[in-house]
Amino acid sequence: MIPIPIRRLALLTAIAPALAAPLLGTATATGQESPAACTSAAWLEPAAATAPADPTRAEAAEPAPAWLTADLTDACSGESFALADFAGKTVYVEAMATWCPPCRDQLSRVKEAAAQIPEEERKEIVLVALSSEVDLPREDLAAYAVDNDFPFIFAVMPAKMLQAMAEDLGQEIAVPPATPHLIVAPDGTIGELRTGSSSPEEILALFAEAQNADAS
């Protein structure tokens, strides 16, 4: 079990619009509105602002993998973040590429699963799609999110992050058509890297498993 350190970044605080959106919603960052057509900036309030640190976990904490704290840029808003910023949430991470039809199909199933999450639970789940096209302009990735109507957080993985994930999780993370995906539980536990298509029901079961494990 790897508790995730929480970085003190200037993330947006306007959480209400995010919770009111049809799926996970969109929000603004540092007071600046993202383009109306771009829906990938689904920011949520970081756990540091909502829950006190658990000293028991802090004492037993192991260093987080480098890829959890790697700097990323939201393709839609341009805001910087790291996966570690969502500590205390259930984080679904999908490695993908804009040229990859299986990736688009899998993200469509994730979107379908997200639509079934009760509104009061949506704030506890973060969906992140990471492009392994390390040189892809973020504007192109934002356009992909818009064209496919995917209301997730999209970002391009830096080469060092992709390498770190491959070393830690397996080379499949760098093979987009394998639709590699995993979940980081609220307590920081990193789930196994899964490949192949998952149905909306299977994705919802993964969310529930991660949240139930944290509650036990």
Image (tube, grey):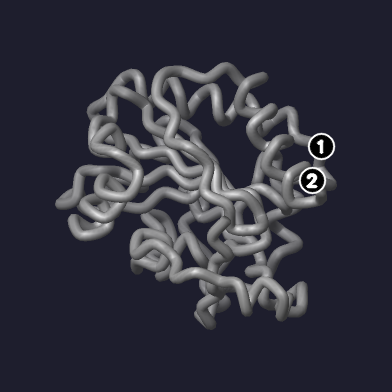
Considering depth in this image, is 81 or 76 the residue closer to the camera? Answer: 81
Q: Quadrant of the N terminus?
A: bottom right
Q: CA distance from mark 1 to mark 2?
A: 5 Å
Label 2 near label 1: C-beta < 8 Å? yes
Any part of residue 18 in sight: yes
Q: Residues within 10 Å of mark 1 (few under 14, many from 20)?
A: few
15 vs 212: above or below: below
Considering depth in this image, is 169 or 50 the residue closer to the camera? Answer: 169
Q: Is residue 100 left or right of residue 24?
A: left
96 vs 20: above or below: above
Q: Amino acid at mark 2?
A: Glu
Return the x and y of residue 39 as percentages of the image width and height: 52, 47
Residue at image location 64% in from the left, 49% down from the top: 90
The image's mark for residue 121 is 2
Return the x and y of residue 93 as percentages of the image width and height: 47, 43
Residue at image location 38% in from the left, 32% down from the top: 180
The image's mark for residue 118 is 1
Residue 22: quadrant of the picture:
top right
Residue at image location 39% in from the left, 62% down from the top: 65
